[in-house]
Image: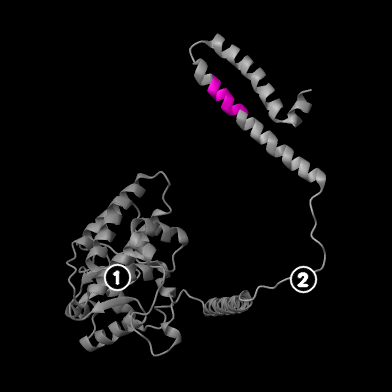
């Protein structure tokens, strides 16, 4: 990473709630971290305690006390084994102004050899802060600005590659940094980093002795009780329905063995009237007549053949006359109808 030749510090730093509890020595140690030539524009650099004490003009034990105070105020993160320093809020206070600046910072952060060690989480949190700050800054650009596409093409693969290497450790860091952001920023980060879309529920990494702390953060206690009560009522209704069904089945099975019979009556059986007998006989004779008519027509068609239409017409006429005479002979009722 390139060393710094100048430093940009917000003027609101003196009124910050984080720096108010610090004394003069601790504030100067913090300012030395911004002004040292060991620093860079990524907010993450190696700063040996010997050089830090030399720049701040303090003793080693005084430096250690100042570092503890700065860590307690959430102004820095410092790994004493690797002597790696991260200035918290460096990118959120000074986000990149354009896509070229973002791409340059991505290259600087990519050149960091991220080994699985004690300072691994510090590096991941710094990258997460930069990614969220870059997305928030890009929302103020023009919608048709070409820098939007350039930023997406560079930032998206960078985040996905880190997730493949570090998994949930990097995902948790990005989620924590993105939590206070707007919905638009979360949607934009979700399009660049799809793994965030599956990070809907935040739970404790280890079981807690307190019963309430083991509950998912996004689940409301009242909602859980309402859902549980609703399920219990549904189960009770199903039990009542099943018991009623079983009771009805048992009753039906008990009564099915004996079929209820009507009491005997002394009333005489009703006999059909004479008109009913005649109508039934008439329907039977008409059905037999039409069956005979269809049989005679089929026989005449076969005998005459299908080649000569004139013969067919003559056969139909003769058939109609003959068939009518035969039907009238067999059915006195039809004779009366034809007359």
Marks 1 and 2, the one that precedes in the sequence: 1
Task: Give the quadrant of residue 252.
Answer: bottom right
Q: Residue at x 38, y 87 (%)?
A: 208
Q: Is residue 95 visible?
A: no
Magenta extent: 293-300
Q: Secondary structure at mark 1?
A: helix
The numbered disc on residue 168 is 1
Q: In the orientation shown, which residue stands out farthest toward the bottom?
A: 209
Coordinates of residue 66 in the picture (x, y in percent): 29, 84
Relative to residue 212, is residue 41 depicted above or below? above
| Side of 182 relative to 87 (left or right) | right
Please name whichever residue, 70 or 327, is drawn nearer the observer in this view of the structure: 327
Q: Main secondary structure of the magenta part?
A: helix
**Cα distance between the residues tagged 1 and 2:** 86 Å
- Colour pattern of the rendering: one colour
Question: Which numbered tag is attached to residue 123?
Answer: none
Instruction: State if disc 2 and disc 1 touch (CB < 8 Å).
Output: no
Q: Nearer the viewer, residue 87 or 153?
A: 153
> Is-magenta flag for residue 298?
yes
Residue picked out by circle 2: 264
270 is within the stretch colored magenta: no
Q: Residue at x 62, y 76 (%)?
A: 248
Q: Residues within 10 Å of mark 1 (few under 14, many from 20)?
A: few
* Quarter of the image where the N terminus is located: bottom left
Q: Is residue 330 left or right of residue 99?
A: right
Residue 201 visible at all: yes
Q: Looking at the image, which residue is at 24% across and 63% down?
A: 164
Residue 23 image position (x, y, % from top left): 36, 84
Please identify the quarter of the rendering in which residue 335 is found: top right
Name the image quarter holding the C terminus.
top right
Q: Secondary structure at mark 2?
A: loop
Image-quadrant location for residue 135 = bottom left
């Amino acid at each position: 990473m390139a060393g710094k030749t100048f430093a940009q510090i917000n003027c609101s730093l003196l009124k910050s709630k984080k720096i108010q509890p610090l004394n003069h020595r601790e504030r100067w140690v913090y300012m030395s971290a911004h002004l040292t030539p060991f620093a860079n524009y990524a907010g993450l650099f190696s700063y040996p305690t010997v050089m830090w004490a030399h720049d701040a003009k303090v003793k080693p034990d005084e430096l250690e006390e100042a570092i503890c105070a700065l860590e307690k105020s959430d102004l820095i993160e410092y790994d004493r084994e690797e002597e790696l320093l991260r200035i918290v809020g460096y990118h959120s206070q000074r986000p990149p102004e354009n896509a070229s600046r973002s791409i340059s910072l991505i290259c600087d952060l990519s050149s960091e050899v991220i080994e699985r060690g004690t300072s691994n989480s510090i590096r991941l949190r710094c990258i997460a802060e930069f990614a969220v700050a870059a997305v928030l800054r890009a929302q103020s650009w023009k919608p048709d600005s070409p820098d939007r596409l350039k930023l997406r093409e560079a930032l998206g693969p960078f985040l996905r590659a880190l997730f493949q290497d570090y998994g949930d450790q990097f995902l948790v860091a990005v989620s924590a940094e993105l939590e206070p952001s707007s919905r638009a920023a979360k949607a934009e980060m979700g399009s660049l980093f799809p793994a965030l879309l599956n990070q809907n529920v935040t739970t404790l990494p280890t079981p807690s002795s307190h019963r309430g702390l083991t509950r998912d953060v996004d689940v409301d206690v009242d909602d859980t009780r309402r859902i549980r009560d609703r399920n219990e009522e549904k189960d009770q209704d199903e039990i009542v329905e099943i018991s009623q069904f079983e009771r009805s089945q048992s009753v039906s099975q008990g009564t099915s063995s004996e079929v209820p019979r009507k009491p005997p009556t002394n009333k005489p059986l009703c006999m059909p009237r004479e008109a009913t007998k005649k109508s039934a006989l008439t329907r039977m004779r008409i059905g037999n007549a039409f069956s005979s008519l269809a049989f005679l027509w089929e026989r005449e068609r076969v005998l005459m053949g299908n080649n000569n239409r004139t013969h067919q017409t003559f056969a139909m006429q003769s058939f109609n006359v003959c068939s009518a005479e035969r039907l009238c002979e067999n059915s006195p009722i039809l004779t009366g109808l034809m007359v």
